[in-house]
């Protein structure tokens, strides 16, 4: 998306033909004014609507110079505008992916409040003082990391007999983590604010309870957090306030390491089943990925995961997962849970075929998880399917040497010794050749151990002795830094410079054991001498290191 915006910005003539109807300006490249001459109240409102921060500031300054009167309503709106953006032009083209990685799903800014800036000057100029002006300046201070000053302004507001609204109280509750350093003091501060809300006759809303739960989530390692979280949740239900997905997200995050987690997950499923859901903020968007992740980490049953997925797929609830990253986290953990706790690999691949590639593209982490499960359960016959999927999704290139080594080690050792190996020989032979060709075409350097193990698979499964010989010769001679020309008289594979390091001598010896010494005793002897030389060199190196 960022690349597309770059081309639209740098080469606008490529997009002259525009047939879109209706024309949506929000999807057009944003052009900031080069020079600003506006000075009227209407100009100021227009610049704020377009989020042209610097232009709005210039319009306001022009209006002051020309003594143009601006209504208090517009002045308050301008103050809110300046406080929200900290009098700085925002980057309106940050992609959803970048926001996902850069944020902790809170609206936390790395920028600091502009002390004694235009926002504070306008705040001081607004007379008489209003609760709305105080709310604007306090929320700006909180957003841009001036928490102590925000608390000071909040106290001044109370002393001026101005009553904060529910949104400002919620913002102050949200800042408890930064305003106090001790968890006990943080909770005491939250209770103090709740008492002040009661004295001001302000009824807590859903956001109030969610903010309290989010604060307790941040303090989840405090021993009293689970107890207070459940008290907050029960009070919320007592007041007939409907919990949101953010409510359940906080509970999941607080209790995921608790022995009560399974009961909590069942309660949440019971309350959400058959309901149409909507993600209204970032915390809501995180619910489905996080609950599936915590169920996976907490070793919950496949049945619970299925119930969560049933809720997600009810009516239009899938729209609650709004980003590619969230979708990846959700389905990766769903499939991992099924793989770990399902009844069989056959069951796992039923789920896999449902979601791949429609909802999820497997990554190296998923394939590594499957290889570990194969190794721990002894289900080696499924290695052919896993290898095939790795080929399909591009994970058998030189860039994934470590993953390839793990796969090939399993195939050439435990799998080769199992009864299922004989039945899978034809498939393994095809996979090894396809993998070799993939490496050949990638034009990247490859670990010599990968080539040696791949040669071993080919030798163990090849029906054509000549083809197996070719692969074996490539690996042995390239790995031992000789040229293929010296042995077979013609180039048959990778350039020598593309093979990194040397393969394990154990693997080389396994390769030699598969060669038929009677077909070409001279060549066999030559290869044998080279392997023995490598073995001696390895022993000498080990002795040198120990000295």
Image: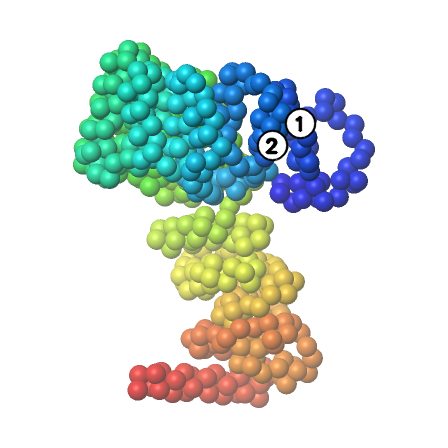
Q: Where is residue 76 in the image (x, y as percent from the top left)?
A: 49, 20
61 left or right, relative to 513: right
In the rendered image, which residue does mark 1 sit on?
38
**SS under mark 2:** helix
Q: Quadrant of the N terminus?
A: top right
Residue shown at 31% from the left, 24% from the top: 156
Give the percent coordinates (x, y) of residue 513: 47, 77
Q: Position of residue 128 (x, y in %)?
A: 41, 16
Which residue is located at x 33 percent, y 22 percent? 157
Q: Is residue 24 visible?
A: yes
Q: Residue 189 carries which label?
A: none
Q: x, y percentage for residue 357?
A: 56, 40
Q: Name the residue under label 2.
A: 58
Q: Where, quadrant-wise, is the C terminus in this rendering?
A: bottom left
**270 left or right of 11?**
left
Where 400 falls versus 314 (above or below)? below
**Vertical relation: 194 (above or below) 52:** above
**Crowdedness of circle 2 by 10 Å Cα count: few (<14), some, many (20+)?**
some
Q: Nearer the viewer, residue 497 or 1?
A: 1
Closer to us: 280 or 74? 74
Q: Which residue lies furthest to the right in this view?
A: 17
The span from disc 2 to disc 1 (Cα, nearest Å) is 8 Å
Instruction: Specify which label sits upstream in the sequence, 2 or 1.
Output: 1
Query: Which residue is rendered at x = 68% and y = 83% of the image?
Result: 489
Colouring mode (rainbow / by chain / secondary structure / one colour): rainbow
- Marks 2 and 1 close (CB-CB < 8 Å): yes
Res. 16 image quadrant: top right
């Amino acid at each position: 998306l960022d690349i597309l915006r770059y081309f639209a910005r740098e080469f606008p003539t490529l997009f002259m033909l525009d047939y879109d109807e209706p024309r949506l300006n929000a999807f057009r490249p944003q052009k900031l004014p080069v020079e600003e001459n506006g000075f009227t109240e209407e100009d100021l409102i227009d610049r704020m609507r377009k989020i042209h921060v610097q232009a709005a500031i210039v319009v306001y300054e022009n209006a002051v110079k020309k003594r143009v009167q601006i209504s208090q309503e517009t002045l308050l709106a301008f103050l809110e505008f300046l406080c929200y953006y900290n009098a700085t032009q925002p980057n309106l083209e940050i992609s959803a992916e970048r926001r996902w990685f850069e944020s902790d799903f809170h609206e936390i800014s790395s920028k600091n409040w502009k002390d004694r800036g235009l926002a504070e000057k306008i705040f001081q100029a607004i007379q008489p003082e209003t609760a709305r002006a105080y709310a604007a300046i306090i929320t700006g201070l909180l957003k841009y990391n001036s928490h102590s000053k925000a608390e000071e302004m909040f106290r001044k507001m109370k002393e001026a007999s101005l009553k904060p609204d529910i949104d400002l109280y919620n913002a102050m509750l949200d800042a408890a983590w930064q305003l106090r350093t001790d968890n006990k003091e943080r909770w005491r501060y939250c209770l103090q604010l709740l008492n002040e809300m009661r004295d001001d006759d302000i009824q807590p809303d859903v956001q109030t309870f969610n903010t309290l739960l989010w604060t307790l989530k941040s303090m989840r390692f405090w021993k009293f957090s689970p107890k207070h979280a459940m008290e907050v949740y029960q009070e919320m239900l007592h007041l007939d306030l409907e919990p949101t997905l953010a409510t359940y997200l906080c509970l999941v995050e607080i209790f995921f390491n608790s022995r009560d987690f399974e009961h909590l997950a069942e309660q949440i499923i019971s309350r959400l089943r058959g309901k149409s859901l909507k993600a209204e903020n970032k915390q809501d968007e995180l619910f489905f990925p996080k609950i599936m992740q915590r169920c996976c980490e907490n070793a919950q049953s496949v049945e619970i995961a299925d119930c969560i997925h049933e809720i997600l797929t009810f009516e239009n609830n899938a729209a609650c997962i709004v980003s590619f990253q969230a979708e990846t986290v959700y389905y990766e953990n769903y499939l991992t849970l099924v793989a770990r706790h399902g009844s069989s690999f056959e069951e796992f691949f039923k789920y896999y075929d449902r979601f791949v590639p429609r909802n999820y593209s497997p990554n190296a982490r998923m394939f590594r998880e499957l290889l570990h499960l194969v190794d721990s359960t002894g289900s080696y016959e499924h290695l052919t399917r896993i290898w095939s999927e790795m080929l399909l999704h591009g994970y058998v290139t030189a860039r994934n040497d470590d993953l390839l080594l793990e796969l090939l080690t399993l195939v050439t050792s435990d799998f080769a010794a199992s009864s299922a190996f004989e039945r899978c020989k034809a498939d393994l032979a095809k996979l090894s050749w396809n993998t070799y060709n993939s490496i050949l075409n990638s034009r990247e350097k490859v670990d010599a151990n990968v080539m040696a193990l791949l040669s071993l698979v080919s030798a163990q499964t090849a029906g054509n002795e000549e083809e197996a010989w070719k692969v074996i010769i490539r690996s042995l001679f390239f790995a031992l830094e000789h040229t293929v020309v010296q042995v077979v008289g013609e180039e048959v594979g990778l350039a020598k410079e593309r093979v990194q390091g040397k393969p394990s001598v154990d693997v080389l010896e396994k390769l030699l054991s598969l060669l038929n010494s009677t077909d070409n005793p001279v060549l066999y002897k030559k290869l044998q001498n080279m392997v023995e030389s490598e073995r001696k060199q390895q022993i000498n190196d080990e002795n040198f290191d120990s000295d």
